[in-house]
Image (cartoon, helix red, strand yellow):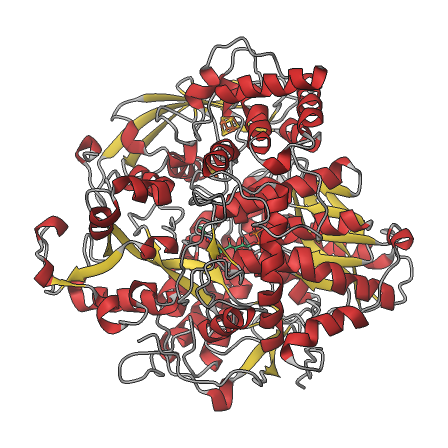
Amino acid sequence: MATVLDSKVPSGPLGEKWEKHKFESKLVNPANRRKFSVIVVGTGLAGASAAASLGDMGYKVKAFCFQDSPRRAHSIAAQGGINAAKNYRNDGDSVHRLFYDTIKGGDYRAREANVHRLAEVSVNIIDQCVAQGVPFAREYGGLLDNRSFGGAQVSRTFYARGQTGQQLLLGAYSALSRQIHLNNVEMHTRTEMLDLVVVDGRARGIITRNLVTGAVERHSADAVLLCTGGYGNVFFLSTNAQGCNVTATWRAHRRGAFFANPCYTQIHPTCIPVHGEDQSKLTLMSESLRNDGRVWVPKAKGDKRRAEDIPEAERDYFLERKYPAFGNLVPRDIASRNAKEVCDEGRGVGEGQAVYLDFAASIARVGENVIRDRYGNLFDMYAKITAENPYKTPMQIYPAVHYTMGGLWVDYNLQSTIPGLFVLGEANFSDHGANRLGASALMQGLADGYFVAPYTIGNYLGGTKLDPVATNAPEFGAVENDVNERVNKLLSVKGNKTPLAFHKELGKIMWNDCGMARSKDGLESALKRIPELREEFWNSINVTGEAGEFNQQLERAGRVADFLEFGELFAKDALVREESCGGHFRTEHQTEEGEAKRDDDNFAHVAAYEWTGKSGAQTRNVEQLIFENVKLTQRSYK
Amino acid sequence: MATLNGTSNGHGKMLSLTLQIWRQKNSKTKGRMEEYKIKGVSTEMSFLEMLDMLNEQLIKEGKDPVAFDHDCREGICGMCGAMVNGYAHGPDEATTLCQTHMRSFSDGDTITIEPWRAKAFPVIKDLAVDRTSFERIIQSGGYISVGTGGTPDANAIPIPKEAADRAMDAAQCIGCGACVAACPNASAMLFTSAKISHLANLPQGQVERHFRAANMIRAMDELGFGNCTNHGECEAVCPKEIKMENIALMNREYFGAMM
Ligand SMILES: Cc1cc2nc3c(=O)[nH]c(=O)nc-3n(C[C@H](O)[C@H](O)[C@H](O)COP(=O)(O)OP(=O)(O)OC[C@H]3O[C@@H](n4cnc5c(N)ncnc54)[C@H](O)[C@@H]3O)c2cc1C
Ligand code: SF4
Ligand code: FES
């Protein structure tokens, strides 16, 4: 039976909901906060900002990450920038416009109230970061500079060269380090959460594995926050860091948290093309490059001339041609699909799976130095990987998996369907609908961590009667047993295929059948092959080494095992969603011009899956999306 | 830049290599160098992809794969790093190990690969080391003490572009530890000074500047890092081109604190 999902969106006009909700929320008085303990899993932008804020407020915080330092979370790699409705440019930006752009960019599949709150607090984020010493780019007058990103006609993106994520994370990390120093936060690095402990229907703790010693440990608390990032690595090749995984959210799903919109994946248009079978990751070239780079392919099929030798008249600047209003700055899903389309027509460059991103016109206009100042580190990175000089020859780019809009279902309070379990950042499904606009993930991570969760968690702790729970409770023992059994099982198969080999095979299925263009046939084939591969995994996985030691093979094996269950739910969700929206493109559902065709009558909802005890047998629950402030239209960027 | 080794995007030459790698089971056991042969390494591969390939081969042969730290593989997280032929992060200038590509090597080469070596960075296994000491340095004062909320408008204090740029140059440090590994004294001066200089260049960082320098330098000494005797190896290997002038700035901040 389907469960009714209550989003707990407060009543009242859109712009007043958050203020009203904050006012009506229960508070925990400062002297009592010490009595509450909170577990924060993940210390990227979302987790580090939440842990630092909660520690600063006086809660007893335990934080966890699998890297050797919070500073190394995947957020560190974000390049281009962070949005905020500051309207410093006086170009017509406002909270409402950022809200509207985000809802529209997400192809009308996000919850209005959450997105509006995000736009409201965006302005505080920039203030917070500057106070911490984040060295954002500035103009000669000393004020903050901005650039433009896709899906917007205003300049609202703040940046720190091509390393915005790094500088924002170092800001949050410094605040977290201070709280660690003050003993308000106990930090556990090189520690992986392997399961969630639910006691009397509430999230009360986690089971972790110390990655250095292999020790499996119990941690209890009054609330648990998952800030564990996205699951793009289900595709094996993606722009994500190697360790990004679905394990924490998947284990929580199996303990009762609903998983929402798993099939919503963002394929980023500007990445360095794949070079060979042994490749381990794809590298993003920031979207900000589309401010100054022009995307093109030759007009003729199979034109093998060098870029320099193809005259202007024989080039097709296909984004500028098809979308004159937004040009090279159309949203990511549209740019990606168009790149795929011209390559499928046989007009791809290089090895065939690539298009040009050309800076010649901008260099002629503003000079090489200005371009170097704006994007120097990206150009260097490109040169290191490809051994080509992008100041002289156009870059070659191709779409790659980049971000996952789906995640654990949360209500307005960022609370999952398990009371006491909150989900922040990329790990939740909340704000980006079916497509995320550039520079909005950093904004969301920090909004959740600095400005939303500190209120909603206080409301939960202040308004709930929680019995004390210790780690010797039987529930902890039972979950710890499950974890140990699983680890031992992985080690005992002693088959003939490595975790890496399985990961690559799963990635191929996902990319071919659940990637940029999805069809009924392809998805059905994926739904057949993924369970087969999972069965093969459990019969022939080879994990070397032992449980009680630093064992990177075991780490990967555990993550791949979870991806092998998750991938199935992903394909199932994509198959049931008989429409195209944002990053989810079903070939059966397109307009005559090949644009995504939504079906608002049947699919203006969030699909939230409930674990029923067996992989692939989840029930599909629905949260109807209610649009009171925007009109649903066919997205047009022409 | 001309294409190197006659390769271009998409095609690679194949290399056969001899690898000498430091193997150490854990922090309690002694390590030793072991030799491995590997064939069919494409010049397009990254150094870590070459190690992935080696590990797949070792597993097939029933041997223990080589442990090495890594995550982003795009030169920004600071997780990777090893001494390659005696150079921290390998032969390429201003490049992390993960961004080093095999086109920098030639067919038939012997490559030695060892972990960072410093008292303050004990080996965990093979090439992975424990850099918790860097965490402690930052925790001792590498921040501006602001809580969440209640901060002034971001444009309330204009900051000259040159100052913001200098702060950003220093803030680019990725905390990889190569500077310590390359230094004959295993000094953490370059790392520590990068953070001090980042914050000292900004108006927000002024209030606590002297405590910050004093506390961070004390932490550095207590954690077992050596002193700076101006060898300059740190600057030479730093993948983010952090400059030694930051160390001079740090010393000025420190003496300011002592006055
Ligand atoms: C190359 C690249 C460039 C990007 N550029 C931009 C940009 O310019 N602008 C923008 O807005 N967005 C950008 N994004 C997206 C953005 O960076 C991410 O969505 C965002 O940083 C995610 O933050 P997070 O805090 O949710 O998760 P993450 O930063 O991924 O952090 C996850 C944390 O969880 C921990 N963790 C995970 N699993 C476990 C577990 N099982 N146990 C314990 N700990 C665990 C990790 O250790 C880590 O600390 C970019 C993404 C990529 C890949
Ligand atoms: S100063 Fe350079 S070498 Fe040292 S930790 Fe920072 S980035 Fe690495
Ligand atoms: S793996 Fe992140 S810097 Fe090398």
Residue A588 as seen in the image, left or right of residue A429: left
Q: In the image, what residue occupies the spot 47% across and 71% down?
A: A101
> Is residue A554 visible in the rendered structure shown here?
no
Q: Nearer the viewer, residue A318 or A254?
A: A318
Q: Is residue A304 left or right of residue A217?
A: left
Q: Is residue A522 above or below residue A130?
A: below
Q: Residue sitting at 44 percent across and 58 percent down?
A: A402
Residue A12 placed where, x, y %? 70, 82
Whether residue B85 sits left or right of residue B127 in the image: it is left
**Which residue occupies the extreme front position in the image?**
A141
A123, A438: nearer the viewer: A123
Give the residue drawn at x 71%, y 69%.
A413
Q: Position of residue A526 (x, y in %)?
A: 42, 70
User: For this view, does A586 lie left or right of residue A214?
Assistant: left
Of the 4 image quadrants, the one containing the N terminus of chain B is top left
Q: Is residue A281 above or below residue B253?
A: below
Image position, residue A341 (x, y; %):
25, 69
Q: Against A515, is A572 above or below? A: below
Query: Residue sitting at 73 percent across and 63 percent down?
Result: A421
Quadrant containing the C terminus of chain B is top right
Q: Nearer the viewer, residue A223 or A472?
A: A223
Kindly tell me whether residue A101 is visible in this rendering: yes
Q: Quadrant of residue A14?
A: bottom right
Between A168 and B154, the one lying in front of the other is: B154
| Residue A398 position in % (x across, y down) | 30, 57
Placement of A571 over or under A170, stated as above or below: below
Query: Residue farthest to the bottom?
Result: A601
